[in-house]
Amino acid sequence: MNNRKTWIIAGIMGVIALAMGGVLLSLNQTEEAPSLVQYQPKYIDAGAMLRFTETLSSDALEGRATGTRGNQAARDFIQKRFETLGMQMLGGAFVHPFTATPDTEGDSSVNGANVVGMIKGTTDGPVLLITAHYDHLGVIDGEIYNGADDNASGTAALIDVAQYFTRHKPVHDIVFAALDGEEIGLLGAHALMEDASVPMQRVVLNMNYDMVSRSEVGELYVAGTFHNPDLLPLVERVASEAPVKLIAGHDDPALGAADDWTSQSDHSVFHDAGIAFLYFGVEDHPGYHTPSDDYANITPDFFARAGDTLVMAAMAADEELDIIGGEKAAD
């Protein structure tokens, strides 16, 4: 390795270290939301959620492609947050490595890792699984694909939902999983299904967050009720009080592959395993899978509202999880 390469790598790692230092300093602090957030959240810390999204989608992390230094740095941020929140490890660790082959023809196997933690409820029984993928596309043709909405936003929201439940103990156990390898074949979701340390046999509902921070019209979609119609009343109750326009849809096969989101993110793997799902996300926007999916282009006020909505939905699911589990058993 020549000196120039050494200095370049040292510079990149130095930037990542500085970014991590800034995040770790703020982990235990309630941050003031930026002025672009007029909404006053009831359940989430909008400032912290936005800050974490900005960090994960910074150029220093180089798009967080699975198997890269930037991806590992993102994983380290998430792990530290899980530790700070006091979440319970499963299998003696938060980081659960896996090796898998991407779905792109000709690709060799990659090493990825999920970050998994649990918040114990007051009772045993069915489990709620909340997921969001933290990987993105990396660097393509010299351009960084930062993936602010896709899916730094969902990862940050997952952490804020977890924070709420560390302060307000749930009735049921909730497993939180930041998944790797979604962009190259839902690899982390498949690995989670095979992870013996995670009580997947007790999971009756998956809530998946993928792209929840960018909507000019204030619309957040939730897919899954077409396949699990018994969940529609729950969604409608949350929608009636949500600070965003929460719309059930994008899950009917008759809509065609582009508009049916059933197979378009990690929840697809759990759906195929017979687990009910609710997938929260926005419709595609000009930044989707382009280098313009940057933090500067998210809609912060909507994101704060979406964060509260996700907590409300998780609270409602926790309250009804025994019923949902009974319906699953009956099926």
Image (cartoon, helix red, strand yellow):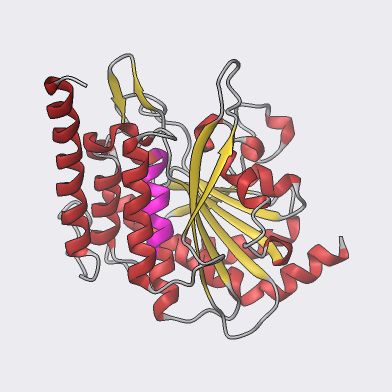
Seen at 66% across and 27% down, the residue is 257
Seen at 41% across and 26% down, the residue is 289
- Indicate the quadrant where residue 64 lies: top left
- Indicate the quadrant where residue 291 lies: top left
Q: Residue 301's spot in the image, x, y percent?
A: 28, 52
**What is the magenta range?**
150-160
Seen at 33% across and 14% down, the residue is 141
Placement of the C terminus among the 4 image quadrants: bottom right
The reply, left or right, for residue 5 in relation to residue 254 is: left
Q: Which residue is at the far right?
A: 330
Seen at 42% across and 49% down, the residue is 154
Q: Residue 251's spot in the image, x, y percent?
A: 66, 41
- Indicate the quadrant where residue 122 lies: bottom right
Q: Residue 108's spot in the image, x, y percent?
A: 56, 23
Depth check: 277 or 242 in front?
Answer: 277
Residue 96 position (above or below residue 82): above
Placement of the N terminus among the 4 image quadrants: top left
Q: Would residue 156 be counted in the magenta stretch?
A: yes
Provide the major secondary structure of the magenta segment: helix
Q: Is residue 109 visible?
A: yes
Q: Would residue 299 be counted in the magenta stretch?
A: no
Q: Is residue 179 visible?
A: no
Q: Which residue is at the far bottom?
A: 122
Q: Which residue is at the far front?
A: 1
Depth check: 242 or 86 in front?
Answer: 86
